[in-house]
Amino acid sequence: MFNEVDRYLAVTPDVRQKILQRENFNVFFHYGLNTFTGKEWGDGKVDPKVFDPEKQDTDQWVRTVKEAGAYGVILTCKHHDGFCLWPTATTDYNISATPYKDGKGDVVREVSESCKKYGMKFGVYLSPWDRNHPAYSTPAYNDVYCAQLTELLQNYGKVFCVWLDGACGAYMDGKEKQEYDWERFFALIRKLAPDACISNCGPDVRWVGNEGGFARESEWNVVPKFSYDIQTIEENSQKEDDGKFAKKGADVVFSDLGSRKFLSKYNDFIWYPAEVDVSVRPGWFYNKSQDGLVKSLQTVERIYYTSVGGNSLLLLNFPPDRRGLIHENDVALAKALGARLRESERQAVKIAQINAPEGEKGHDALCVTDCAYDRETGNPVSYYTPEKESDGYRIEIRLERKAKINRVRIIENTAFSQRIEKFTVYAETDGKFRKRYDGNTVGYNRICVFDKPAVTDRLIISIDECRRKPYIEFIGVYEDNGVVIKKPRFFRLRQFIHEKSYKLFIEKENKKYCSK
Ligand code: FUL
């Protein structure tokens, strides 16, 4: 019988999203006049002559973050100060007005070329809020913005992501906030860069709701179709450069955006994966005073396992310094992170046997040991799905050998939407199966990190609640890498308080869009 659940299941990712969900760890480069003034938000009045990196080497930037394990980079081609890192025709406030290469430089070109050289994807951040352009706050600014997008998307090769920032403090300049023509921006991006995801204030990737590196415990991809403004701009984005915003830790808007209970209040749904954007330093731009404050490997690993490992995307910021290089301390972190991630991947223990409810023809349970996918469609080469629907599904795993296990990775085949709603992982020790992990969502990637490793060769994944039946593309079991995920203690409390006060506002607003 067709019911509400089938409406959620009808919502699936497009190819752009499927590819991004697989290549789910990318890097931000915040770079521009702020790098040289030590500010986070430039006021648009700084003399471009301050931009004078003596050793700028974008190959070093890209090599560094490739070593960290990232798939692509996103450059702040223009931040809120309106300064453009490429020789644009739309304003004189650009790289040509700087001493860099005697005004002949083009940082966007350099970064995009380095990406080609090292096989990394290239993306652009173009701040909608512009504190320098005289047309800002008038309809003409939408033309300027489109012209800037056109230059960036036509002249620098393939772009994988266009990142539209919701932050705005126009009132600080005594200006009205621009009425952005979002639909026009989206249509232009689709035309010029059809493969690019439009992130944050866009239809493809949802901002997780904070800049502290926190994802929800249960991230859902099928969510109500809120207005983009409400989800990203109005209340949540940064409005003041007071240095506090990025530290606000756990201000995730709602802890639940996609359970059946939550969805039942709405009518329209979209596939909208979350992205955690966070800097390896307290600030987004380089600041010498923060050289000793680069996040520890432990902290970044916690961010990685809870974002990438929790059905979220990760966008980690590595800001180049005044020399035009990624600072040694940040390089050390990037190298250590990459080494850990590669080592952790090598710790997979072979699965020898799987017992599970009988699979559909051609989709039996052993299919889950293979994680290959098609680059054109983003779909997996193989997947498991039980033939029949039932109340629960038990997947018993026997490993090739006994090992000290601390992680199980599960991937759902999202071509069939996100289905698992509650699951438990058990490991057998001393003749008994003991619970090691439980959660709600799996989605395109769930890395279940056990609190304590288990020496075992037998595990059970029990899918306790599911929208119809599961479609599982991959299960991996890994030897202990020593990772411990400690949740900050204030997380739940802050989230609770924040939600209470926020709920009323957002529900009222949402009624305009998704009334039921
Ligand atoms: C925020 C901006 O205000 C920050 O400067 C930074 O660019 C961050 C990624 O987004 O909204």
Image: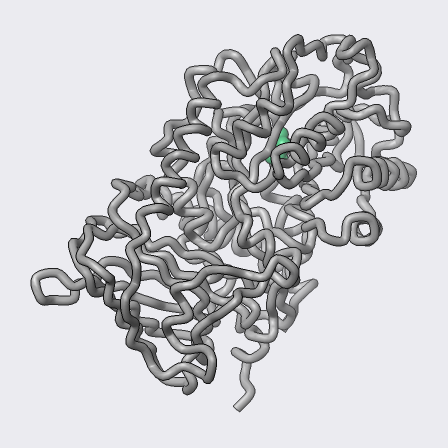
Q: Residue 495 vs residue 456: left or right? A: right
The quadrant the C terminus occupies is: bottom right
Location of residue 190 with respect to 211 vertically, above or below:
below
Location of residue 10 with respect to 93 vertically, above or below:
below
Residue 426: name its quadrant. Answer: bottom left
Location of residue 142 with respect to 63 vertically, above or below:
below
Residue furthest bottom as drawn: 1
Residue at 90%, 40% in the rendered image? 143
Residue 204 place in picture, x, y as percent: 65, 54
Residue 333 place in picture, x, y as percent: 43, 26
Q: How many marks?
A: 0
Residue 278 place in picture, x, y as percent: 51, 35
Residue at 59%, 43% in the rendered image? 236
Is residue 487 in view?
A: yes
Location of residue 111 with respect to 377 vertically, above or below:
above
Q: Nearer the viewer, residue 321 or 139?
A: 321
Q: Nearer the viewer, residue 476 or 152?
A: 476
Residue 379: name its quadrant. Answer: bottom right
The colour scheme applied to this rendered structure is: one colour
Quadrant location of ligand 1? top right
Residue at 73%, 35% in the rendered image? 126
Residue furthest left as drawn: 430
Is residue 441 in view?
A: no
Residue 9 place in picture, x, y as percent: 55, 74
